[in-house]
Amino acid sequence: MKERNYSGNRSDKKKQSRPMPSIAKREQADEVRSGDRIVVTIKRLGINGEGVGYYRRKAVFVEGGIPGEVIKAEVIRVENKYIAAEIREIEKRSPHRVDAPCPVFGICGGCQIQHLSYEGQLAGKEEIIREAFARYAGMQDVRLKPMLGMDHPWGYRNKAQLQLGMAQEGMIAGLYAADSHKLIDITGCPIQHPKVNEVVDKTRNVLQRLGIPVYKEKGNQGLVRTLVVRVGFQSGQLQVTLVTASDKLPRRDELIKELRLAMPELTSIAMNVNPKNTSLVFGNRTEVLWGADGIQESLGDLEFTLSPRAFFQLNPLQTVKLYESVRTAAGLTGRETVVDAYCGTGTIGLWLAPYAKEVRGIESIPEAVEDAKANAACNGRINTAFYAGYAEELLPRWVKSGFTPDVIVADPPRTGLDPRFLEAVLKTKPKRFVYVSCNPSTLAKDCKALLDGGYVLEWVQPVDMFPQTSHVETVVLMSKK
């Protein structure tokens, strides 16, 4: 059976129509060359959502491959440690293969596994975690709890951050295709909250109708770079932010009037100015053009005011499950002191505060620390304090002054924990270390260092924060021997 749109990439039709070479009969993997056709059994999902199989014991990465499938694939690249290949025919099809509902799946790059049933997605992500711990921590039987998934794994993103550009059909809002500067229109994106999609469409239409020019890097011309839309899941409030190359906004009053007429439920309209030629979306200056300074959102009993640049979890429903998993791991009785490292705007620390004696948050970005302090004051979390700095520096200083935390929680970026922070943890020796990770590979590597330093891995709790993508969030509890 010929698979024409296995990953939604329409450009593959041309490749599949040309005559294919016969199956390569190479004795060794090192003999494989680009253009060879090989047969691969997909064993698991890779960390980027690709299918992973083996040819002569060498790993083969096949975009769009699903565990359990037998695939005839064309080799497109040969590296020292792996082979990259593309599907040409599926000999044995997985029962978990489904038709992706999004017309630009496989092109825009925002999702990687829409072609996999949700049951298959959860199983695949669990296997990604097992593989990481086996490979990087030497643990073949890690205690993995069942994945916490969603009842409805669509429409969960509360924020869209889209580039604007011009096409034959007019102004479009979307994402750049992988490894290119081609803007892909993602109108009606199925993982965005429906209200976010509606606001994106209406705002784009107003901008086009008023002739507000979009920014073009070539020639440094135009004005509006990025459209940012956020909805409060609990409050229902809506926020529109235009990221512009200049503070000179033409037809400003008309724009505000038209946006309010098109969307009477709008809460806030803002403009962020970013004149620099940079990959960063936001500039340093934000002006509220109309309405409130921020929108209201809540997690459990916590209330937040979200300014246009404020960080907030993109999937609030799953965030509650994630934070409850952290609370379970922390095992608080009301007598413990807690350090929340890499605390961001303080949400995890604030979630734990009612169950602890004292919570101290550490974050290297001063603006985030100010947001954390404001969030603490707003919610009456008087047993919390937040500090700007680096955990690997502040933690040893606190211990030296007599403050020894019972629990340390860390939620680092994808690169994992700073080696100096790991060293500081091992010297501090908290009873419990709770690791919140968005990257199974760096998680397993860091856990290996803690295991070698005298900690025991109690359990691993995966949480599916981003259905239809290959990303997986994980909470790990480690305790001192």
Image: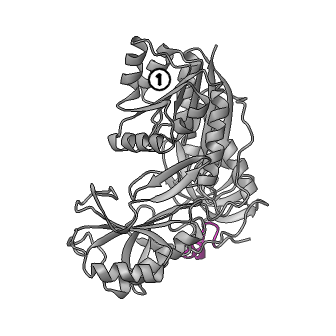
Give x and y (percent) for residue 401.
39, 12
Residue at the image point whose x is 60% and y is 46% from the top:
301
Q: Does residue 203 appear to the left or right of 91 in the view shown?
A: left
Give x and y (percent) for residue 455.
60, 18
**Which quadrant of the structure image shows residue 38?**
bottom right
Where is 424 relative to 94, above or below? above
Secondary-structure class at tag 1: helix
| Residue denoted by label 1 | 422
Residue at the image point whose x is 52% and y is 54% from the top:
33
Give x and y (percent) for residue 365.
35, 40
Residue toward you, 180 or 326: 326
Residue toward you, 182 or 187: 187
Where is 108 relative to 363, above or below? below
Q: Does residue 419 appear to the left or right of 480 in the view shown?
A: left
Residue toward you, 256 or 124: 256
Give x and y (percent) for residue 419.
43, 25
Residue toward you, 48 or 258: 258
- Mark 1 crowd level (few <14, some 14–19, many ≥20, 10 Å Cα): some
Query: Magenta includes 48?
Result: no
Quadrant where the image shows the C terminus: top right
Quadrant where the image shows the N terminus: bottom right
Where is 311 relative to 389, above or below? below
Picture mark count: 1
Query: Residue 42: in sight, yes or no?
Result: no
Query: Residue 434: in sight, yes or no?
Result: yes
Q: Which amino acid is tagged 1? A: Leu
Secondary structure mostly seen in magenta is: loop
Residue at the image point whose x is 26% and y is 69% from the top:
217
Q: What stretch is highlighted in magenta?
A: 5-20
